[in-house]
Amino acid sequence: MRQRGMVTVELALAMLGAAGVAVVISWVVTVLGLMIQCQDTAAEVARQEARGDTTAAERARSDRPRGAEVSLREVDGAITVVVVLLARPWAAWLPGVPLRVQAVVLAEEVGQ
């Protein structure tokens, strides 16, 4: 009869474990959200550069996640935009996740 508190301890440990799992899942979802923002930025910048609309391309660059670097390259009529980010959601002391996304778009022909 001395084991009355055993269920309480097991329940407390299970709740701590569940809370830890919830935090990790939230962190992963945040990193995925940053990756999606980087992909959106790369696609939009590439699309606007392909059209020749540099103003819209600059506006798209300004919408990138904080800390992301956007690079642009044009080879044989194909515009490649690469967005690189060391994702550190929530706190700078947490491990960073290197994200790299790219979008490739063919340049549009200027009207004739």
Image (cartoon, rainbow, N blue to C red):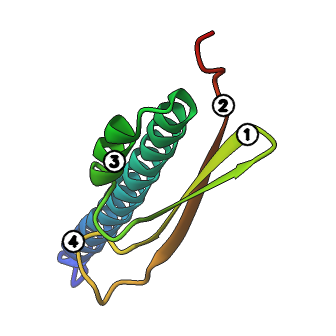
Q: Could you tell which of marks 2 and 1 lies nearer the N-terminus?
A: 1
- Crowding at label 1, few (<14), some or many (≥20) Cα neighbours within 10 Å? some
- Residue extending farthest to the front is 112
| Spatial CA span between label 4 and label 3 | 52 Å
Residue of label 2: 107
Compute the Cα span from label 2 to label 3. 17 Å
Q: Residue at x 53, y 64 (%)?
A: 99
> For mark 4, what is the residue?
12
Q: In the image, residue 89 lies at what x, y percent?
A: 30, 69
Q: Which residue is drawn at 35% across and 75% down?
A: 88
Q: How far apart are marks 4 and 1 (CA)?
A: 57 Å
| Labels 1 and 3: the sequence-earlier one | 3
Name the N-terminal-most of marks 2 and 4.
4
Label 2 close to label 1 by CB (< 8 Å): yes
Looking at the rendered image, the disc whose residue lies closer to the viewer, 4 or 3, is: 3
Question: What residue does disc 1 label?
Answer: 78
Q: Is mark 2 on a helix, strand or loop?
A: loop
Residue ID for mark 3: 58
Q: Percent from the top left, x then y, of residue 94?
A: 34, 84
Would residue 1 appear left or right of 36 to someone viewing this image?
Answer: left
Disc 4 + disc 3, Cβ < 8 Å: no
Position of the N terminus by quadrant: bottom left
